[in-house]
Amino acid sequence: MTSLRTNQDLDPARLREVFGIFPSGVVAVAALVDGVPSGLAASSFTSVSLDPPLVSFSIANASKTWPDLRRAPHLGVTILADHHSAVARQLAGPVDNRFDNLSLTATDDGAVLLDDGLAHFDTTIYREVLAGDHTIVLLQLHTATHTGQAEPSPLVFHRSRFGRLLKPL
Ligand SMILES: Cc1cc2nc3c(=O)[nH]c(=O)nc-3n(C[C@H](O)[C@H](O)[C@H](O)COP(=O)(O)O)c2cc1C
């Protein structure tokens, strides 16, 4: 039997590598802040609760965007599709260009959604839980919609790379 290596492997670079073995989708979290779209890409999104309807993502405490974004009355969450790898990078890049050439819809409450996403949530912050160097943000859903189409498939983030799902088993 192969023995597992223990906590000499818990430095951040090594942890990032090991966490990356778990595949995830990617979302855009975005809202109008002072009338201007603000947001970021997040792969830490997960569904949490049906009643009340909750999802979560984790934001780095070092984020420069989150202190402004969290002030928005509503936050939009868009699940990205497999053709969005460049969009995901853009949404993690220089703040002034994150929404360049993206087709967006803003709700009356200022949630910002990417028009060609696979699913959309209109949310408000339910709770923020400090968790080490990140904060777990619980979001309460006000609307949840999806395209209803089997294609395209979701964007997948795995081992620090983007990919797509193969056909279902
Ligand atoms: C695929 C992908 C997933 C990401 N997931 C997260 C995440 O879950 N949480 C997070 O805080 N940042 C995540 N980031 C980084 C943010 O998108 C952004 O680059 C970072 O927050 C720095 O920008 P800021 O200082 O404006 O927040 C991710 C970036 C990429 C490309």
Image (spheres, rainbow, N blue to C red):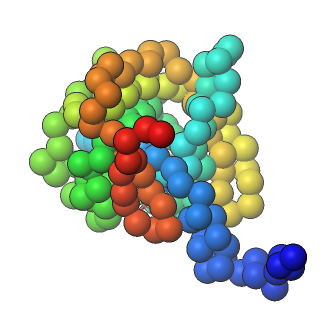
Which x, y percent locates residue 42?
A: 47, 50
Q: Is residue 103 left or right of residue 92?
A: left
- Which residue, as the protein is rendered here, is positioned at the far left? 101
Q: Is residue 89 left or right of residue 156?
A: left
In the picture, residue 50 is in which quadrant?
Answer: top right
Q: Who's the residue at 65% across and 57% down the image?
A: 134
Q: Is residue 83 left or right of residue 123?
A: left
Say if 27 sits above or below 7 in the image: above
Question: Can I make out residue 18 in this image?
Answer: yes
Which x, y percent locates residue 94?
A: 29, 65
Q: Who's the residue at 50% across and 68% down the image?
A: 159
Judging depth in this view, the residue of 32 and 14 nearest the camera is 14
- Which residue, as the protein is rendered here, is positioned at the far bottom? 8
Say if 159 sits above or below 146 in the image: below
Say if 38 sits above or below 22 in the image: above
* Quadrant the N terminus occupies: bottom right
Q: Who's the residue at 68% across and 14% down the image?
A: 51
Question: Can I make out residue 39 in this image?
Answer: no
Which x, y percent locates residue 91?
A: 32, 54
Judging depth in this view, the residue of 165 and 62 nearest the camera is 165
Q: Is residue 70 left or right of residue 105?
A: right
Q: Who's the residue at 26% across and 41% down the image?
A: 36
Judging depth in this view, the residue of 95 and 24 nearest the camera is 24
Judging depth in this view, the residue of 24 and 108 nearest the camera is 24
In this figure, what is the number of numbered marks? 0
Which x, y percent locates residue 135?
A: 66, 51
